[in-house]
Image (tube, rainbow, N blue to C red):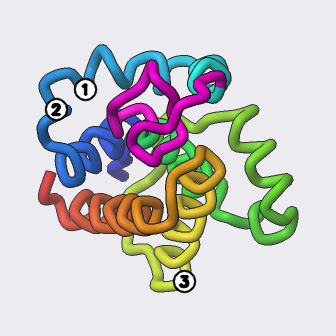
Amino acid sequence: MTTVSVHDLAKRVVEAVAPSELASFEPVAAPYLDHPARAERRLRRGDDDPLGFGLGDAVEMVTPVVALVSGSVITALSDGFGEAVKGGVGKVFRKLTKRRAVEAPVRAWSEDELAKVRATALVRAKALGVREAKAEALADAIVVALLLERDGRG
């Protein structure tokens, strides 16, 4: 069975929403992929909001948010959303920040599962301070990236 990693999903989404960041993807995304909780704490310390992403002065790129949201989505996919439905949003995100799946199986997801992927991405992006329109676009890009991965268009 093939899988999709957090790294690959994040890179595909960055390629779609901010292709100019691809050249610097690896060094910028690394802390958010390798140590997401620690990197997120540093990210949240910023007070300024130059891009509407709630990232502060230190981050002027989309890549960090995409990496964190991708991690949440892959974890939710690997868990099958079962706990997400039972536990409510607050419990889900506490769980997602404690344990990050590195990859999830690629398969023919149902419309309901894709809707849950989108909802997970949307809620997570908003929790990171992304404004509504940008959060919607990011959530859509996550779903499209997963569909492309499923169809082998990587």
In terms of secondary structure, where does tag 2 sit?
helix
Residue type, label 2: Leu
Residue type, label 1: Phe
Quarter holding residue 88: bottom right
> Bounds of the magenta span?
45-64
Residue 57 vertical placement versus 103 (above, below)? above
Task: Identify the disc placed on residue 112.
Answer: 3
Q: Residue at x 20, y 21 (%)?
A: 24
Pick the residue in front: 46 or 105. 46
Q: Position of residue 2 (x, y in %)?
A: 33, 50
Whether the magenta-drawn stretch holds residue 60 is answered as yes
- Left or right, residue 107 beside residue 80: left
Mark-to-mark CA distance, 3 and 2: 31 Å
- Write down the residue under mark 2: 22
In terms of secondary structure, where does tag 3 sit?
helix
Q: Residues within 10 Å of mark 2 (few under 14, many from 20)?
A: some
Marks 1 and 2 close (CB-CB < 8 Å): yes
- Write down the residue under mark 1: 25
Q: Residue at x 43, y 74 (%)?
A: 109
Q: Position of residue 14 (x, y in %)?
A: 26, 44
Q: Residues within 10 Å of mark 3 (few under 14, many from 20)?
A: few
